[in-house]
Image (spheres, grey):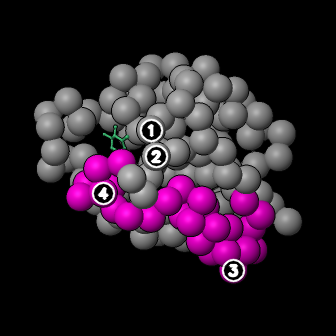
């Protein structure tokens, strides 16, 4: 079975207690479990990883080359700052869907720019944890379309 990497960046390990008025009440393990179920329904295995460290996220993206058909990425604040993550996505050339729990375009100006968006196949922002499931649906459809 093909595999998808679900990769979450800094501070997303604190979901559930972190600013719930912005990021919701669900914990990351709960979101990951729902994503694993959704992926299985779509015919994919899921690897879920989280790191607060930019280099570890780059390494996870590189590792995905060996066994993943695509990536769902919430890079957290690195979305707005990290050319290294953008280059990693471009380098592995795996279809990547960018996800944000909050609507980054309705928030502070510094969150409006994403370095990931130009190398992603699309961006889902503002739908809370549902966004991860929408991203899996979109990625699976893309992969199936790409492979025929
Ligand atoms: C998560 C973060 O940690 C922020 O730094 C981003 C994103 C938004 C989210 O909405 O999931 O700006």
CA separation, marks 1 and 2? 6 Å
Q: Nearer the viewer, residue 14 or 137?
A: 14
Q: Is residue 138 left or right of residue 76?
A: right
CA separation, marks 2 and 4? 10 Å
Residue shown at 54%/23% (left/top)? 54
Q: Position of residue 20 (x, y in %)?
A: 30, 57
Q: State if disc 2 and disc 1 touch (CB < 8 Å).
A: yes
Closest to the camera, between mark 3 and mark 2, is: 2
Q: Which residue is mark 3?
A: 41
Chain-order first, disc 1 or disc 4:
1
Dividing the image into 4 quarters, which one contains the N terminus? bottom right
Q: Which residue is mark 1?
A: 11
Residue shown at 77%/34% (left/top)? 63
CA separation, marks 1 and 3? 28 Å
Q: Label 4's element?
A: helix
Dot 2 beta carbon under 8 Å from ligand 1: no
Q: State if disc 3 and disc 1 touch (CB < 8 Å).
A: no
Q: Is residue 40 left or right of residue 111?
A: right
Chain-order first, disc 3 or disc 4:
4
Q: Is residue 26 magenta?
A: yes
- Which residues lie in the magenta part? 18-46
Judge the density around disc 3: few (<14), some (14-19), many (≥20) Cα neighbours within 10 Å: few
Q: Main secondary structure of the magenta part?
A: helix
Q: Which residue is mark 2?
A: 14
Judge the density around disc 2: few (<14), some (14-19), many (≥20) Cα neighbours within 10 Å: some
Dot 1 beta carbon under 8 Å from ligand 1: yes
């Amino acid at each position: 079975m093909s595999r998808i990497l679900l990769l979450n960046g800094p501070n997303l390990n604190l979901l559930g207690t972190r600013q719930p008025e912005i990021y919701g009440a669900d914990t990351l393990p709960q979101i990951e479990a729902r994503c694993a179920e959704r992926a299985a329904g779509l015919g994919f295995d899921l690897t879920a990883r989280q790191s607060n460290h930019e280099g570890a996220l780059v390494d996870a993206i590189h590792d995905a080359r060996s066994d993943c058909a695509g990536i769902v990425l919430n890079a957290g604040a690195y979305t707005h700052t990290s050319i290294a993550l953008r280059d990693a996505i471009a380098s592995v050339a795996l279809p990547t869907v960018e996800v944000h729990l909050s609507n980054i375009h309705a928030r502070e100006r510094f969150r409006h720019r994403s370095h990931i968006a130009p190398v992603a196949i699309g961006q889902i922002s503002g739908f809370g944890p549902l966004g991860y499931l929408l991203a899996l649906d979109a990625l699976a459809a893309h992969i199936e379309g790409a492979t025929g």
